[in-house]
Amino acid sequence: MDPLAIDWAALKDQAESELQAASSLQGVEEARVRWLGRSGRIALALRDVGRLPAAERPAAGAQGNEVRAEVEALVSERLSRLEAEALHARLAAETIDITLPGQRPQVGHAHPLHQVWRDLVRIFGELGFAVADGPEVETDWLNFGALNIPEGHPTRDAQDSFYVADGQLLRTQTSPVQIRAMQALAPALPVRVVAPGRVYRRDTTDATHSAVFHQIEGLLVDRGIAMSHMKGVIAEFARRLYGPETKIRVRPSYFPFTEPSGEVDVTCVFCHGAGCRICKGTGWIEIMGCGMVHPVVLKNGGYDPEEVSGFAWGMGIDRVAQLRYGIDDLRHFLQNDLRFLEQF
Ligand code: DAH
């Protein structure tokens, strides 16, 4: 063979075996530079074509260009093969099991206290009572004075509260909404509202005491309202809340804003009157205070006690929820522990 002759076939074979041996993208890139780079093996060989006898140059040049094109094709073939292999490896490694159950978004629900709150409002709604509202920061006048609880009255001690500013406090009861509702409606009749809401007392919190709790107030004012109306409404309410067998009894009591006043017991929800641990053997469970609205209160609400009369009641929502769900510690209601809340 002519010592100057270029063995293109051998060059191509060698390039091919080097490319086949390259097992990484980087290896292929190195081989490409080595063979197709500006001073790579093929470029150098093509430069040698110029030193061939003139007659051989065209054929050798053409052959060289052909080999270069073939090596280029081999490079890109090798590259795409390695890329495909890498992709397959990744797909195999990163497989996701689409049969696994998805992550459920956490859906909340009403707090047990609020479930009871809504039930009570619904029942009174069915009996014709609308919902009235009042602020939790209340004036001393509406929380006490207008309700016939003047300064120095012992009831103020029993309902000691958090004073926010002069003459303003966190309401100790929902009863001020009685005055607000009457003032908003007077002289229209009837006044027929319930007022559920949060109330506050200066109590140290333990299993049976809480500085924050909930009440629902009721008020009905109209012409010719008697105590029998009160008993009828409360008895019907009790039957709708605790079942048709439920009975009530009204015991005499005292509240400054009602006269006469009473406390209402229902037959024990658990033993139905036989006597058990929950009702402490009495067969009865106290559920609310009530009474005929005091003339002073009617007057403060904007009504003439000579013309109208009414009854009112107030009950604890927390207590109803405790009885319904068998919750022995009031603190559960306020701690927002999901392990507790998710049970209801
Ligand atoms: N406000 C009273 C309390 O917190 C409950 C109450 C009793 C409300 C009798 C009334 C009522 O409307 O007539 O202890």
Image (cartoon, rainbow, N blue to C red):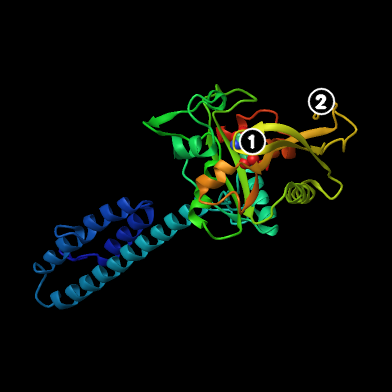
The residue sitting at 81% across, 30% down in the picture is 279
Q: Residue 17: x percent and y percent?
A: 36, 57
The residue sitting at 50% across, 30% down in the picture is 150
Q: Residue 149: x percent and y percent?
A: 53, 32
Q: Residue 188: x percent and y percent?
A: 55, 60
Task: Bin the neighbour count of mark 1 within 10 Å (Cα to Cα): few under 14, some 14-19, many 20 and up.
Answer: few
**Number of marks in the image?**
2
Distance of label 2 from label 1 (alpha carbons): 26 Å
Indicate the amino acid at tag 2: Lys
Q: Is residue 127 left or right of residue 103?
A: right
Q: Which quadrant of the rendered structure holds the N terminus?
A: bottom left
Question: Comparing marks 2 and 1, which lies closer to the viewer?
Answer: 2
The residue sitting at 88% across, 30% down in the picture is 275
Of the numbered discs 2 and 1, the one sitting upstream in the chain is 2
Give the residue pinned by disc 1: 340
The quarter of the rendering in which ligand 1 is drawn is top right
Indicate the amino acid at tag 1: Phe
The residue sitting at 46% across, 34% down in the picture is 170
Give the residue pinned by disc 2: 280
Query: In the image shown, does 302 or 219 lie closer to the viewer?
Result: 302
> Do labels 2 and 1 touch, CB within 8 Å?
no
Task: Bin the neighbour count of mark 2 within 10 Å (Cα to Cα): few under 14, some 14-19, many 20 and up.
Answer: few
Secondary-structure class at tag 1: helix
